Image: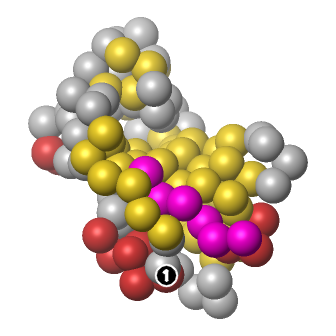
Amino acid sequence: MAIEWINYKENGELNYKLPFSPDHVKQFVGQKTRVTLKDNSQKVGFASSNFVNNTLVLWTFVNLDENTHQLTGSDRLKQDYVKIPLSEITKIETILNSNPRSGMQLTNKFKVRDKEL
């Protein structure tokens, strides 16, 4: 079964939907990403450029206060990494320009502005 890739605009509207190819990873590196696994569980994080052996890597900020959207503590930039084999993924969703460097709110949640997707 092919993996479906859904990309949302910054306002949460559908941008496009298409079959996923590993070549697409470079298009959403650093963007907020949600993957749905074969067991229907979901993983959310920022997509890493470390795509090796058909494994997608997502990372989240460990010391992020979701209420203030600020990094806290002495190790503010600490990140957790999760490796997900493509063979376990059924759907990949991304949000266009969702990296905080693009002006989006800093959050580990899959949302745009105050709207959770």
Residue drawn at (60%, 55%), measured in percent from left and top? 91
Q: Of residues 117 and 104, which is closer to you in this image?
A: 117
Residue drawn at (40%, 27%), measured in percent from left and top? 111
Q: Is residue 79 left or right of residue 115?
A: right
Quadrant hosting residue 42: top right
View extreme (left): residue? 103
Which span is picked out in magenta?
A: 1-6
Residue drawn at (61%, 66%), measured in percent from left and top? 3
Q: Residues within 10 Å of mark 1 (few under 14, many from 20)?
A: few
Name the secondary structure under disc 1. Answer: helix
Task: Say what amino acid the circle numbered 1 marks.
Answer: Pro
**Which residue does the numbered mark 1 point to in the structure image?**
22
Query: Is residue 95 located in the magenta-colored stretch of the structure?
Result: no
Q: Confirm whether residue 56 shows in the render.
A: yes
Does residue 111 sit above or below 23 in this rendering?
above
Q: State which quarter of the image contains the C terminus.
A: top left
Query: Is residue 3 located in the magenta-colored stretch of the structure?
Result: yes
The colour scheme applied to this rendered structure is secondary structure
| Residue 107 image position (x, y, % from top left) | 40, 29
Does residue 16 sit above or below 104 in this rendering?
below
Q: Confirm whether residue 74 shows in the render.
A: no
| Residue 105 image position (x, y, % from top left) | 26, 27
Q: Is residue 73 left or right of residue 27?
A: right
Residue drawn at (26%, 46%), measured in percent from left and top? 15
Q: State which quarter of the image contains the N terminus.
A: bottom right
